[in-house]
Amino acid sequence: MTTHDPIPARLAALKTTPTPDLKKQWRELFDSEPPPFNRRYLESRLAYRIQELAYGGLKPETVRRLERLGEELDGGDKKKRGMRLDRDRPITGTRLLREWQGVGYVVTVTADGFEWQGRPYKSLSAIARGITGTRWNGWVFFGLKNHRGRS
């Protein structure tokens, strides 16, 4: 007997859920008021929390190790932790997901660019061109900027 996992459907539904309903889910899942950040932030944090509650979060020893590594990098200065050199660039390790003509594509952000299908790329535009066969602004194609170029 196979069981259906409802979590992927819940995650997919976040994209089309009205913002007031996302904020309601936030209150239910985090037991706090949602932060005044953009919709994409709410979606990503809710997606993580849904998975964390369903499948389990990080092990305590992993959390301790990450905290130690963070302290090594910033000397315990929590203000430095929030800083990123390139504000527009996603954090290394981020997976960008895009569906194009019914096919799902995954691109991973690396320290010096991006990786798609096991190959390194310097730009998202090159990957978007490889997927579509036409010229695209890679940041727009992957939903990182709107059509007017703002993040």
Image (cartoon, rainbow, N blue to C red):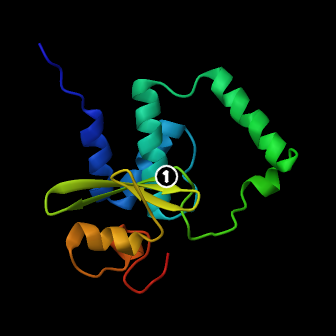
Q: Position of residue 120 (x, y in %)?
A: 44, 59
Horizontal placement of 72 versus 146: left or right? right
Quick one: SS at disc 1?
A: loop
Residue drawn at the location 48% of the way across and 81% of the way down: 150
Name the quadrant of the N terminus: top left
Q: Position of residue 123 (x, y in %)?
A: 45, 71
54 up-or-down from 151: above or below: above
Answer whether residue 23 is visible to the viewer in this image.
no
Q: Nearer the viewer, residue 86 or 146?
A: 86
Which residue does the image show at 24% across and 28% down from the upper left? Answer: 5
| Residue 103 in which image quadrant | bottom left
Q: Can residue 145 be seen here?
A: yes
Indicate left or right for 124 with 77 as reference. Answer: left
Farthest residue to the top: give it: 1
Q: What residue is shown with label 1?
A: 94
The one nearer the camera, 52 or 76, is 76
Observer-nearest of 7 and 20: 7
Image-quadrant location for residue 144: bottom left
At label 1, counting other C-alpha atoms closer than 10 Å, the crowd grade (few under 14, some 14-19, many 20 or more) is: few
Q: Residue at x 37, y 80 (%)?
A: 137
**Number of on-image labels:** 1
Image coordinates for residue 98, horizontal then vertical, percent: 29, 59
Looking at the image, residue 94 lies above or below residue 10: below
Instruction: Inspect the image, locate mark 1, and give the three-letter code of the amino acid beneath it.
Output: Thr
Q: Whole-percent x and y of residue 147?
A: 36, 83
Residue at position x 76%, y 42% in the image:
70
Task: From the viewer's perspective, tell me whether residue 33 is left or right of residue 127.
Answer: right
View extreme (left): residue: 1
